[in-house]
Image: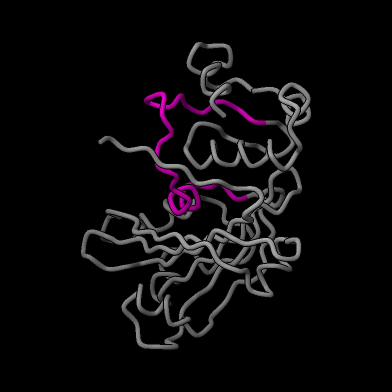
Amino acid sequence: METLRRRIKDGTYPVGEPIPSEAMLGREFGASRPTVVRALNEMQLLGELQREHGRGTFVKAAASSGAPQNSRPGLAVLDRQETPASVRVLEVGRCPAPNAVAMLLGLAESAPVHLRRYVGLYDSIASELVSLWAPLDVARTTGLDQEGPLTVPVRQLLARSEDRLTRVDERLQARRPTDDERQALDLAEGEPVLAVLGSVVDSAGRAVLAVEVALPGSLHVLEDSYGL
């Protein structure tokens, strides 16, 4: 990733232009395809690259410093443009809120919520399993309850509400996958996931959305950098 960052910084790969294909990068660096995909996924989560199915990977922005910035999977989900090629929708509908989700949303245990669950695809590789839980009134008024891929990013749908969004709170856990996660992500036996669970909070202090992103451990590394 650091070599790609240097090339973006020095203008070898200008903003808005494509970088070499995964196959070309793999040959240049002697890396396997999963390793290349993992690096590109990480740079996309950091907002440095934009991956477009059928077109390639484009430079979105250069990092503000030479060091990696915080990974923000929840924010990446909010800003994603869903297409039939980039997501495989698994479930859309009402369900009881899991305990952790009910706590994040300030609801009673097993209260009904609206769930959207999909697999994020990058060049046909299952890269992440995303679950979005919204209170029923939020799902109804914003359009989160529509079937299939959303026509606009989640952040824009939530912006239809009266109160603006102010923050995303996330926590990261490395754990064994559930049976559903193992099947949806086609995980190898014993492969762990990095699970990011968070909430989106509006200016009234209400959590309007709970987000969980399950990332295959073999495809993702989340990095951080901070001053001393």
157 left or right of 161 in image: right
Above or below residue 211? Residue 135 is: below
Q: Quadrant of residue 148?
A: bottom right
Residue in the image at 42% along x and 77% along y:
100
115 left or right of 185 in image: left
Above or below residue 146? Residue 15 is: above
Q: Nearer the viewer, residue 190 or 62?
A: 190
Residue 191 percent coordinates (x, y)? 68, 61
Q: Quadrant of the N terminus?
A: top right
Residue furthest to the left in view is: 204
Q: Nearer the viewer, residue 73 or 156?
A: 73
Above or below residue 63? Residue 179 is: below
Residue in the image at 68% along x and 40% along y:
37
Residue 111 percent coordinates (x, y)? 42, 87
Residue 134 percent coordinates (x, y)? 43, 71
Above or below residue 180? Residue 73 is: above
Q: Quadrant of the C terminus?
A: top left
Residue in the image at 58% along x and 23% along y:
4
The colour scheme used here is one colour
Magenta stretch secondary structure, dominant: loop
Residue furthest to the front in view is: 228
92 left or right of 10 in image: right
Question: Is residue 73 magenta-colored?
Answer: yes
Residue 161 percent coordinates (x, y)? 33, 61
Q: Nearer the viewer, residue 210 or 143?
A: 210
Question: Is residue 80 magenta-colored?
Answer: yes
Q: Which residues are magenta?
A: 57-82
